[in-house]
Image (cartoon, grey):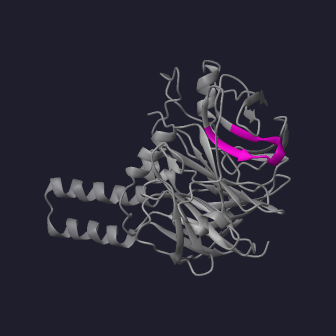
């Protein structure tokens, strides 16, 4: 199965119900065996127990040295806004949390970062000003109070200033620009006066550079290389990546979706640092992949969301296959904390599967987006490091 932007959304729509507890499943196994000794029910009980083992194999297993870095965190509900439907991205800015909610009538939602109450909404489905056909990514511009929304269906970004968002009054965005060029654009970051940098599926190169008006300028960096039989466009798809969200304008964090590679590149595409790899896996795709990478049940997901501070890079990690975790592999509960020189320093294990993370401006809290048992914003206190 191939997963592009639409495929990612389809995966979340198919997300399974909350997994039962281990004790509940084991009690169910015992009751079934005690109640009836018929072979069919015994086999049924065995199947349920096997599912129990599968469910609890969802937590990522690391080697001994990496396991020592694990630190469990318990979260609290910051907001359980009943209008949240499919939140996928979050940014902490100006004492507010800006959330991208793909499934809602209003695509962008703003919350008070201290109290969790919703204070404004913006955007609707469509193709006109202030509308979105395929809102996919949310990012900020340097240290300013400007937020950008990437619409992958329209190859367009919309600039939103926090003050304008909060004022309402028929606001339709401060600026819209459409990116020229070929390729499937999947992640973009603003570089101030230098324009924009993006990743996606291209015939060559790693990063696409755009002017401030959205005009394609050039490709930089090496084309990802996969197995010898892979066509370049298939390798690009297999090594799809999302850019880190930090507002830095002289380098980019490249977090891969299907391999546990995480790199820092300069704006010429040269590698500045490579992060420690927690498991050491590469993309697995079907041998029938031709124009797109066709992923399988054994394709292991890697990084889902990345944000950084002056000292650390925080990366939400799945580390699970669809065979192991079903469509829950689109979510993660391990936040890997790296130093900028690439060393893995801590693994923060959350108590809930989440899809996106943000660091509050004080640097003391981790805000996350969860979908189960209902869409909500969870907050975790960050330990000293």
State the residue at coordinates (62%, 75%): 113
Task: Give the image location of residue 64, x and y in percent.
Answer: 69, 59
Check the image and report above or below for 360 versus 309. Answer: below
Residue 93 vertical position relative to residue 237 in the rendered view, above or below? below
16 relative position to 319: left or right: left
> Which residue is situated farthest in the front direction here?
169
In the rendered image of this protein, does residue 376 appear above or below residue 182?
Answer: below
Residue at x-position 59% and y-position 36% = 283
Residue lying at 50% horizontally and 49% vertically, measured from the top left? 131
Q: Which span is picked out in magenta?
A: 186-198
Q: Position of residue 51 (x, y in %)?
A: 35, 56
Q: Is residue 189 magenta?
A: yes
Q: Quadrant of residue 236?
A: top right
Split into 4 quadrants, where in the image is the N terminus? top left
The image quadrant that residue 212 belongs to is top right
Depth order, front residue of 351/281: 351
- Horizontal side, residue 28 vs residue 6: left or right: left
Q: Quadrant of residue 267?
A: top right
Residue 320 visible in the snapshot? yes
Viewer-closest of 251 and 118: 118
Q: Nearer the viewer, residue 321 or 375?
A: 375
Q: Main secondary structure of the magenta part?
A: strand
Res. 63 in view: no
Q: Tell me residue 272's x, y (percent).
A: 86, 43
Residue 15 in percent (x, y) is at 40, 54
Q: Is residue 339 above or below residue 189?
A: below
């Amino acid at each position: 199965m191939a997963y592009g932007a639409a495929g990612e959304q389809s995966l979340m729509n198919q997300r399974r119900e909350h997994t039962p507890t281990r004790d509940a499943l084991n009690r169910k196994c015992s009751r079934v065996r005690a109640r009836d000794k018929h072979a069919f029910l015994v086999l049924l009980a065995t199947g349920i127990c096997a599912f129990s083992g599968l469910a609890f194999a969802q937590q990522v297993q690391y080697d001994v040295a990496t396991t020592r870095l694990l630190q469990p965190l318990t979260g609290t509900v910051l907001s359980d806004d009943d209008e949240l439907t499919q939140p996928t991205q979050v940014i902490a800015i100006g004492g507010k949390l800006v959330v991208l909610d793909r499934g809602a009538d209003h695509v962008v939602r703003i919350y008070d970062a201290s109290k969790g109450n919703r204070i404004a909404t913006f955007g609707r489905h469509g193709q006109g000003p202030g509308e979105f056909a395929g809102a996919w990514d949310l990012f900020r511009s340097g240290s300013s109070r400007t937020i950008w929304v990437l619409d992958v269906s329209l190859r367009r970004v919309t600039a939103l200033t926090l003050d304008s968002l909060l004022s309402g009054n028929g606001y339709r965005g401060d600026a819209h620009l459409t990116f020229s060029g070929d390729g499937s654009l999947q992640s973009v970051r603003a570089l101030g006066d230098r324009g924009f940098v993006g990743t996606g599926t291209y015939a060559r190169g790693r990063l696409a550079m755009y002017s401030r008006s959205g005009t394609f300028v050039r490709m930089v960096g090496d084309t990802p290389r996969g197995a010898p039989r892979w066509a370049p466009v298939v390798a690009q798809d297999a090594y799809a990546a999302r850019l880190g969200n930090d507002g830095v304008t002289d380098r980019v964090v490249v977090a891969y979706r299907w391999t546990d590679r995480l790199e820092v590149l300069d704006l010429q595409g040269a590698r500045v640092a490579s992060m420690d790899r927690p498991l050491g896996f590469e993309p697995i795709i079907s041998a029938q992949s031709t124009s797109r990478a066709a992923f399988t049940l054994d394709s292991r997901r890697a990084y889902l969301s990345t944000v950084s501070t002056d000292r650390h890079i925080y990366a939400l990690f799945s580390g699970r296959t669809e065979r192991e975790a079903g469509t829950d592999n689109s979510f993660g509960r391990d936040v890997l904390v790296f130093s900028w020189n690439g060393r893995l320093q801590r693994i923060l294990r959350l108590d809930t599967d989440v899809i996106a993370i943000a660091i509050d401006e004080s640097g003391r809290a981790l805000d996350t987006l969860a979908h189960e048992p209902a869409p909500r914003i969870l907050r975790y206190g960050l330990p000293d490091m």
